[in-house]
Amino acid sequence: MSAPTTSPTGTWTSAAVTGDGTTLGSRSRRRWRAARWVVGGIAALLLTVLVLAVMRPAGSVIPYDPENSRPDGSKALAQVLGRQGVQVEHVTRVADAVAAAGPGTTLLVTPATYLLPEQVQALAAVDADLVLAGADDGLLRAATGNQVQRTSWRPAPDAPVEPGCAVPAAVVAGPSLLAPGLESTTPDVSTCWADADGASVLAALERGGRSVVVVDDPVLLRNDEVLTEGNAALALHLLGAHERLVWLVADPADSTVDEGLSPDPAPGSVLPSWFGTALWWAVLVALVTVLWRGRRLGRLVAEDLPVVVPSAESTRGRARLYRRARARGHAAAGLRAATAQAVALRLGLPRSSHPDSVVDAVVRATRRDPREVADLIYGPPPADDAALSELARRLDTLESEVHRP
Amino acid sequence: MALSWRAVVLAALGLVPVAIWPVPGTVLIWALVIVVVCLLDVALAASPRDVTLQRTVPASVRLGTPATSRLVLTNAGRRRLRALVRDAWPPSLAAARDDDGGLRPHTDAAQPARTARHSVQLPVGESARLSTPLLPTRRGDRVAGPVTIRTLGPLRLAGRQASIDVGGRIRVLPEFASRRHLPSRLARLREMDGRASVQVRGEGTEFDSLREYVVGDDVRSIDWRATARGGDVVVRTWRPERDRRVVIVLDTGRTSAARIGTTSDGSLNSGGTRLEASVEAALLLAALADRAGDRVQVLAYDRTLRSRVAGASGPRLLPAMADALSAVQPVLLETDWAGLVGQVRTRVSQRALVVLLTSLDPAVVENGLLPVIDQLAAEHQVVVAAVTDAEVAQMRAGRADVEEVYDAAAAARGDLERSAVAAVLRQHGAEVFEALPDDLAPRLADTYLALKSAGRL
């Protein structure tokens, strides 16, 4: 190490410096001290996410889903059916349901709000036995051939109601507390648990060689209501009629109607299979590029900069004020006074000269009409912006005509 | 740890295995390959802390004059050094090389120039000398940044980086672009001085010598008494007074911070404040007055004394002034004129020429200079030299559309107000003039010569 030196020729030489006095250990400690809170925070966040992921209940949270064990799910019913030998096929797409619901199966349609008209037609036309739980009016009419309609909303009865019909499932189930909401006019339709106004809970009919059963109140499928009165018996009887049960919980985003003819294919299907891999490769290249460009070759060197206030700002501000206030009089007065001062200086007049003497001197120098000169320098303010421009131009001309005597 | 562009190329080459086995696992394996190879390269790179550095810079450099920062690197480690080195300097010193090899100064904020990077290959124990070109664009003291060394491993994919403070400071002196006006003014001075053929006789000149009459001399300067004693016709010669005092005062208050239109003479005075023009004028006047045999003193003042040069003369004067004025910067404070006059009166006892380099802002003059000008003008010859804005002068001539006419009217109004203030100052006995930044220095020199020839110093 040598001390900095200044030579007689005016150059300065630094001491010879090797390294910055840090070691790998000291740098690591310093970096750890600087980053420990950030690292600790990220670790705590990851731990929280992990714990939440472990503690999250398994299964679905969608209502009437056969894998949902919450009160609004239907796992209890699906499990009992499975134990009884019924093969429960859970589908979320209408196209899948239509494809799976062949002859000799049962298709359960849980409440679905966003079915398209084509989807409704496709569901109504399947060969399987149909069980509609809480179906909306469109699906109801399509599936029953307009033989069953919905009534206005009614509350569930306070006391159990007897079935009062010959449908086997209803007879087995016995009294029920389900809310009525269906009405039918044709005698081909059996209605059960009808109230005084004729609104019933269940409607069953034969149509196209298979049975269609409509239950207006879908709560009989739910985990929390399935044990109420005869709900379990009714549900098991309706859904366990065949070996296979297709359980449709329609996905609101689904718009499929038929396999292969789906109007809106999923995004992945039109892209080649290697696309995902190529995307990951692009991400890798981008990441390496970011790391390459992200490291600066040493920090920026700071420098105190002077204040940036253009001196002409105040003059510009005054010009804008003149313009906004349409102060043509002031503007013209400024220009005239400047011209008067310039010609007076050129003609050797004192600053305090009377206007008349200025006009006289200018007239002598330029041989112009005295009235014109007086009007130009001391005349009335211009009427509009065009007159102001014209005045400025004429003052320039006058000034250029006046020479030193 | 730092990557090079070769690491990106390596990552991009992953397209080949991805094309052969298009499954996400390929990308993962390729990423692992990159990580392993880069870590290996970092482990094999020379340590940037095993390099001995020594920086040599000029202690001071004139604004706009290219300079060089020299850096000597010695590989003190046990591995071959492949490195990228940056000798960092503040932006106003950094200069980029043009395509034709010339230096491009850092004047455009949108296009920052960066200090040069050097690629270095050093075997163990050897040294290299790196030259970083610098082109100063602002006055003042500039402290060097650190030296950053990025060493690369044998594959040059990745490496290690360290920034090491070496120290270094350059004092950027004023440009003194107005020195091109000096020869013509010195010629005028010699004409006045009796060394040239033209003899000027007037008030304020002092008797120099007697010599024989030659045809063309002014007959009024014949010394009849000496002619009678001798026999030949003898004339007296005269020369201007010498050893007068000149005090140049730079106002560094807030009005000196305003940016005036850029100078058009191609100089690099990009600071562009009023103070820059004042410094140029002060340097020219000092150089001229020193040659004329007067004693020059310079004060830079706003509310306190920022800088002062006194007692220097001859070849030591200009370096001393450049050094003292290099660090003077505008301060956003109202100038204390009473204190300034007090400074002048305590520093100067004899009658002197006091030059005030300031602006003629009406409000500032009325509240600041006007109440105290009498104290100064009673004892000294006062010259008030003000810098006007080239942009305002441009606005004054604008007639293209209505907006420009309004601009011209506002500029004319401002000119009138300033000339009224100048007239008031003249009534108090001061010599007042305004000039554009480029014209200020020659105008001040001319005013000085006029006063000197008139014997009013």
Image (cartoon, rainbow, N blue to C red):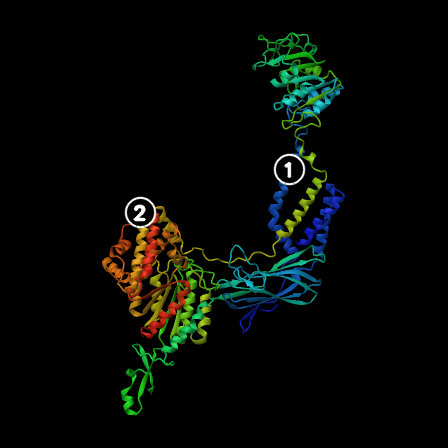
Image spot of residue A172 (x, y percent)? 70, 10
Image spot of residue A333 (x, y percent)? 30, 53
Mark 2 element type: loop
- Quarter of the picture containing the N terminus of chain B is bottom right
Q: Is residue A303 left or right of residue B43?
A: left
Identify which residue, A92 or B415, lies in the foreground. B415
The answer to whether residue B368 shows anywhere in this view is no
Amino acid carrying mark 1 in the image: Val
Task: Classify mark 2: residues with Cα within 10 Å, few (<14), some (14-19) or many (20+).
Answer: few
Q: Residue at x 69, y 60 (%)?
A: B46
Amino acid carrying mark 2 in the image: Ala
Identify which residue, A328 or B161, lies in the foreground. A328
Query: The disc numbered 1 marks a residue on which chain?
Result: A
Identify which residue, B26 or A73, lies in the foreground. B26
Identify which residue, A38 or A29, lies in the foreground. A38
The image quarter containing residue B439 is bottom left
Query: The disc numbered 2 marks a residue on which chain?
Result: A
The image quarter containing residue B412 is bottom left
Q: Which residue is mark 2?
A: A383
Q: Is residue B24 above or below residue B438?
A: above
Q: Which mark is residue A49?
A: 1
Image spot of residue B137 (x, y percent)? 50, 62
Task: Classify mark 1: residues with Cα within 10 Å, few (<14), some (14-19) or many (20+).
Answer: few
Q: Is residue A399 above or below residue A109?
A: below
How far apart marks 1 and 2 lie (CA) works out to 76 Å
Q: Is residue A8 above or below residue B51?
A: below
The residue mark sitting in front, 1 or 2, is 2
Image spot of residue A244 (x, y percent)? 74, 20
Disc 1 and disc 2 on one polypeptide chain: yes
